[in-house]
């Protein structure tokens, strides 16, 4: 998933970003409310984690602004204020969930998974394609010979292509999903990951096709 984190506390933001990246998510980190509105309005995200107390604009106002322009991005709000009135204000502004600081990363990631399950294109539980099985809860890919060891970026690439099975995913979309919008990555980084993933999935009844100038498409070889 491509997650936008809006948090001005640098050590907390780095901890959240690193933990989510270790799970294979791409994380765009912003520390200012105005910047967050501009970024989310222009680029969108699969999910946003937004602190309430930010310079320039509160988290409540960020959510109101992105909802007013039709953005339906799932939002988890973070705050040190646990009063009922604050939670109600956040939910009324358009947030989907609310987490009070301090919190455990395990709880945040569980809430992220819960919101991800609401996505229209989300397939629950174990997903099958070709001779492969992908256990979303365990984030594990298995083939005819057992578990396939995929580093986090290859796993994120597999999940991105799986979520768009039978459809072309542009190289830019893949790069944004794996590294974050505007990340400084080598031009052939996506091609190298595609090549590695193809080798590891060989013989599993799955093909990853290159649509020149357009992107990549993963499908069951039998279709």
Image: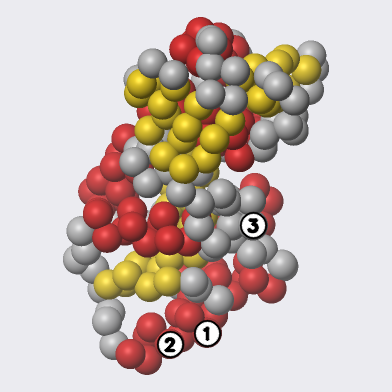
Q: Is residue 68 above or below residue 141?
A: below
Kindly report which numbered mark, 2 or 3, lies closer to the viewer in this rendering: 3
Name the image quarter holding residue 174. top right
The residue identified by callout 3 is 120
Residue 64: x percent and y percent?
59, 75
Image position of 113 with respect to 168: above or below: below
Q: Is residue 204 visible?
A: yes
Residue pictured at 41% horizontal, 56% vertical: 112
Q: Quadrant of the C terminus?
A: top right
Nearer to me, 203 or 65:
203
Q: Closest to the observer: 39 or 45?
A: 45
Q: Which mark is residue 41?
A: none
Q: Which residue is mark 1?
A: 92
Residue drawn at 45 percent across, 79 percent down: 90
Q: Residues within 10 Å of mark 2 (few under 14, many from 20)?
A: few
x and y percentages locating residue 78 in the rendered image: 35, 67
């Amino acid at each position: 998933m491509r997650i936008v984190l809006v948090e001005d506390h640098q050590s907390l933001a780095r901890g959240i970003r690193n933990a989510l990246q270790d799970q294979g998510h791409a994380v765009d980190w912003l520390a200012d409310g105005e910047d967050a509105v501009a970024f989310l309005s222009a680029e969108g995200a699969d999910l946003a984690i937004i602190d309430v107390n930010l310079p320039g604009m509160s988290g409540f106002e960020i959510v109101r602004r992105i909802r007013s322009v039709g953005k339906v991005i799932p939002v988890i709000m973070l705050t040190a204020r646990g009063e009922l009135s604050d939670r109600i204000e956040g939910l009324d502004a358009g947030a989907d969930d609310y987490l009070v600081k301090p919190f455990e990363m395990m709880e945040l990631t569980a809430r992220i998974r819960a919101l991800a399950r609401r996505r229209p294109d989300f397939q629950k539980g174990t997903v099958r394609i070709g001779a492969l099985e992908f256990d979303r809860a365990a984030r594990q890919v298995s083939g005819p010979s057992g578990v396939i060891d995929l580093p986090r970026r290859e796993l994120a690439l597999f999940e991105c292509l799986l979520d768009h099975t039978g459809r072309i995913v542009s190289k830019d979309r893949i790069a944004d999903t794996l590294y974050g919008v505007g990340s400084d990555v080598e031009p052939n980084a996506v091609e190298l990951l595609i090549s590695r993933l193809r080798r590891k999935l060989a013989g599993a009844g799955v093909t990853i096709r290159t649509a020149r100038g357009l992107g990549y498409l993963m499908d069951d070889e039998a279709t």
